[in-house]
Image (spheres, rainbow, N blue to C red):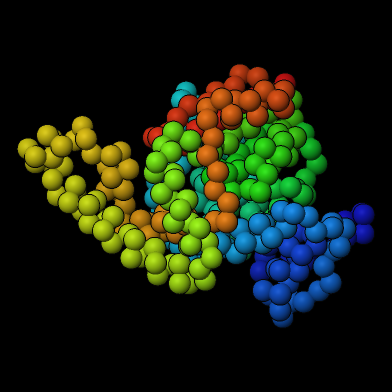
Amino acid sequence: KCACGANYPIIAGVPRMLVGELLNNVLAEYSSKKQVANSSEAADDGQSVRKDTMDAFGFEWSFYSDYDAETYNNWMPKGIVPEEIFRNKVGLEVGCGAGRHAATTAQWAAVHYAVDLSFAVDSAFQRTRHLQNCHIVQADAFNLPFKEKCFDYVYCLGVLQHMHQPGDGFSHLARQPHEGGILLVNVYQSSRPVLTGILEALRKITVKMPLKMLNRFCFVMAVPDYAIILAWKALKNLSLGRFLDPVVPQRIKVYSQYNFKTVVADWFDRLACPVKKHYSQEDLASWYEKEGYKDIRVTPYWKSFWNGYGVKS
């Protein structure tokens, strides 16, 4: 219960700190726990996008809750060591998915709060419930249930590019660290216009598919993809593999470490979300500058992401 008079249910161990229709969606999902939702927020233009995003990522991180690709360090800008910036600190993760990164960060942090808009919080709670210093909350990045300027660090990975207003979403995140606190985000690069254009053309169809049907479609898409990956795994240690190494895409080399289900999950991740935007290095740096951050670093990961870091001034 909040001093403002709002009430938020705790369902399956997770506080559901949403407002308006977003909370109604949660209560409808858990129909045996029906309550009256708060109506303090009027519906806005982004409400339907948030609802579709909640459904897509909720399905993904429930169905693929065992996703175990080791990608924790991939989103760190060059020169940033997670153990050093998270150790004994109090922080916030926005868009925690199934809780993989939350579980890792909580090993070092004093207290780690992890929020997600979707039903992925159920998977995150199960993954982290043994960690006394890790707290999972279902919440919206545009209505975070925390005081501003109270965290040592905040990070948000693979989320901003799926928001209806990514720049505005960044501004909400930027208010959460205190002076001297750290903000880490990553966004998709705009460096591959041809490939991006092909995927966006395909997404015009896939975002309209029922999620179970789309999941089957992603299985089909992953079969030839994984066949190439298996071929590279067989060749990479042979003479031909060493000859081909310079021209084999980095993603093929990385995915050769993972199983088929990981490839299917990543196809679903590309094709399910209602919004998917791409940015330049300068775009991300300008967001930090606009919010008054210093020591800004924006470095690439593959040709896919820009990893951003800044200190609140």
**Quadrant assignment, res 118:** bottom right
Q: Between 306 and 104, which is closer to the camera in this rendering?
A: 306
Q: Is residue 164 above or below residue 268?
A: above
Tell whether 75 sits left or right of 290.
Answer: left
Residue drawn at (22%, 57%) of the image: 227
Tell whether 42 sits left or right of 114.
Answer: right
Q: Between 204 and 303, which is closer to the camera in this rendering?
A: 204
**Quadrant assignment, res 202:** bottom left
The answer, for residue 261, to whether it is visible in the render is no
The picture places residue 208, in percent across and down from the top left corner, at 54, 65
The answer, for residue 79, to whether it is visible in the render is yes
Q: Is residue 45 above or below residue 123?
A: above
The picture places residue 54, in percent across and down from the top left corner, at 62, 60
The picture places residue 33, in percent across and down from the top left corner, at 74, 76
Residue at the limit of the structure toward the top, as seen here? 295
Residue at the limit of the structure toward the bottom, as seen here? 32
